[in-house]
Image (spheres, grey):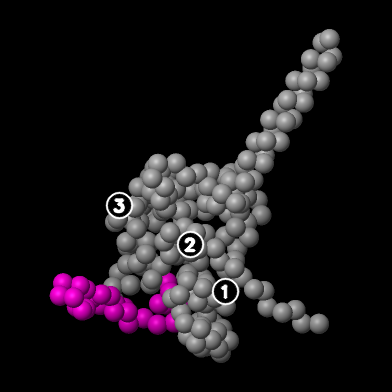
Amino acid sequence: MKQPPRKLTFELIAGRLCLDFANTIDHRLSGNPEDKLSGYAELVEFGQHTGVFSASEARKLRHEGRKNKGEASRLFQHAVAVREMIFRILSAVAARGEVSEGDVGALNAELRRLNTGSLIAPGNGGGAWRWVEKSSGAGKLIGRIVRSAMELLTSEDIERVKECAAETCGWLFIDGSRSRNRRWCEMRTCGSQHKARAYYQRKKAGGTRGSASAKSD
């Protein structure tokens, strides 16, 4: 019996499109990461979920992907390479570490490619300007993600980029708290799990001390 297609849920909690894209791997730093982007169809679904593609655009792109599997595969592999490059750059930024020259070069190459497929045009409101995209399809999504990374890296919010403190998570996010002391991607997941483990360790340590006291008596 044919199984129904898997329904994905992308959690958009990071505060920027590029970070949400980097977060499409669950348990990234564990021995068993779960990649939510297993192919071109999931990439299109992410684009629809984030509002880059309308429902009709997404349907058209899925149809085109089925017709031209080679091109769909190429676009998907390119998107994954961009995702991993963005993760490495922003993970290094979050750790206040040094960004690889290779990754900087790769990002600059993506920006050059983006600039050839876009132009800036005046909009309503006098000095207001807007990007006009000439790219379409999955290329539009990749362009939006790269632009999001560029805008983040050149904004004041770059100082608020953090990586979840959970050992195996690896999710990135903007710490919008006033005190800038947010540690977890989400309190209800990684934060709650940390609290539960800490509570268990305290109980275990208390029980061990109690047993030792009883023996000494």
Q: Nearer the viewer, mark 1 or mark 2?
A: 2
Amino acid type of the residue that numbered disc 3 sits on in the rendered structure: Glu
Seen in the picture, residue 20 relative to 138 is either above or below; the reply is: above
Side (left or right) of 19 relative to 168 = left
Provide the residue span drawn in magenta.
117-142
Query: Is 50 part of what is drawn in magenta?
Result: no
Side (left or right) of 126 relative to 72 = left
Residue 52 appears in the rendering: yes
Q: Nearer the viewer, mark 1 or mark 3?
A: 3
Who comes first in sequence, dot 1 or dot 3? 1
Amino acid type of the residue that numbered disc 2 sits on in the rendered structure: Asp
Residue 109 appears in the rendering: no
Who comes first in sequence, dot 3 or dot 2? 2
- The residue beneath circle 2 is 20
Distance from disc 1 to disc 3, alpha carbons, whole Å, reads 32 Å
Nearer to us in this view, 85 or 164: 164
Residue at (55% x, 88% y) in the render: 63
* Residue 36 position within the rendered picture, expressed as x and y whole percent measured from the top left: 59, 66
Distance from disc 1 to disc 2, alpha carbons, whole Å, reads 14 Å
- The residue beneath circle 3 is 156
Q: Element at badge 1?
A: helix
Who comes first in sequence, dot 1 or dot 2? 2
Query: Is 130 part of what is drawn in magenta?
Result: yes
Side (left or right) of 150 relative to 77 = left
Amino acid type of the residue that numbered disc 1 sits on in the rendered structure: Glu
* Residue 59 position within the rendered picture, expressed as x and y whole percent measured from the top left: 53, 86
